[in-house]
Amino acid sequence: MINRRRMFREDGLPPAHLLRKVFEEAKDYAEAKQMLTETPICLPAIFLLSGTRPGEGCIIERLERDAHVRELKDEPSLAVTNHFHSERLNATAKGWLSRALDSHARCGIMSKDGDSLMPGEFHRLPHAILSHLTRLTARMSAAGGRVTARVWEAHGPVSEELQLG
């Protein structure tokens, strides 16, 4: 409720509306990244952006009028969980702080082991990632035009694995 009250006091876009604007208007990766980084929003958000060329990828951690960008070219792979990595943004106490299960451990496991998973192997994810709180697992490659996803509830999978591309 506190976040919703704060949202109505802000004049920035809701993060989902910004995403729609980016999908409709951005001509390329660089323009999408600039829009996601610089457009004022009304709530903190985390965006994962992938381009189609080698090295085009980043995680954008956003506050209403501030951003921190983690570049793919600076790391072997990127993964995102429910916390900001940026100490500068976390210092404001307005960002996404770790909660529930160990968000930092999940991110580390996904960054290290996520690329080794083949389609049909989401069930092999360790409990730190695949838990009663998991609702969606996905692997995506913009360059390869592939998406693999599965929906979960507390008791287990509630969908077949979807593979596109």
Image (cartoon, rainbow, N blue to C red):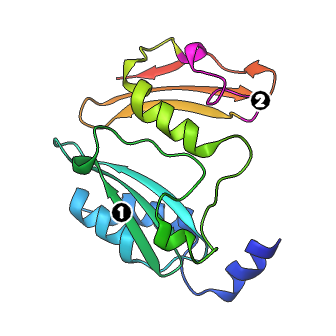
- Crowding around mark 2 (Cα neighbors within 10 Å: few <14, some 14 to 19, many 20+) is few
Q: Quadrant of residue 161?
A: top right
Q: Name the residue under label 2.
A: 132
Q: Name the residue under label 1.
A: 69
Q: Which of marks 1 and 2 is nearer the N terminus?
A: 1
Q: Quadrant of residue 131?
A: top right
Q: In the image, what residue occupies the spot 69% across and 88% down?
A: 9
Amino acid beneath label 2: His
Q: Main secondary structure of the magenta part?
A: loop
Magenta segment includes 127: yes
Q: What element carries label 2?
A: loop
Q: Position of residue 47 (x, y in %)?
A: 46, 56
Q: Quadrant of residue 96?
A: bottom right
Q: Where is residue 157 in the image (x, y as percent from the top left)?
A: 70, 19
Query: Which image quarter is the N terminus in?
Result: bottom right
Which of 96 and 26 lies nearest the eye of the viewer? Answer: 96
Relative to 54, is 6 on the left or the right? right
- In the picture, the disc for residue 92 is none
Q: In the image, what residue occupies the spot 61% across and 33% down?
A: 136
Q: How far apart are marks 1 and 2 (CA)?
A: 30 Å
Given contact means CB atoms under 8 Å apart, are the residues at marks 1 and 2 in contact?
A: no
The magenta region covers 122-133
Query: Which image quarter is the C terminus in?
Result: top left
Relative to 142, is 126 on the left or the right? right
Q: In the image, what residue occupies the spot 55% across and 63% down?
A: 45
Relative to 89, is 3 on the left or the right? right
As drawn, which residue projects farthest toward the left?
Answer: 54
Q: In the image, what residue occupies the spot 54% across and 81% down?
A: 12
Relative to 125, is 100 on the left or the right? right
- Crowding around mark 1 (Cα neighbors within 10 Å: few <14, some 14 to 19, many 20+) is some
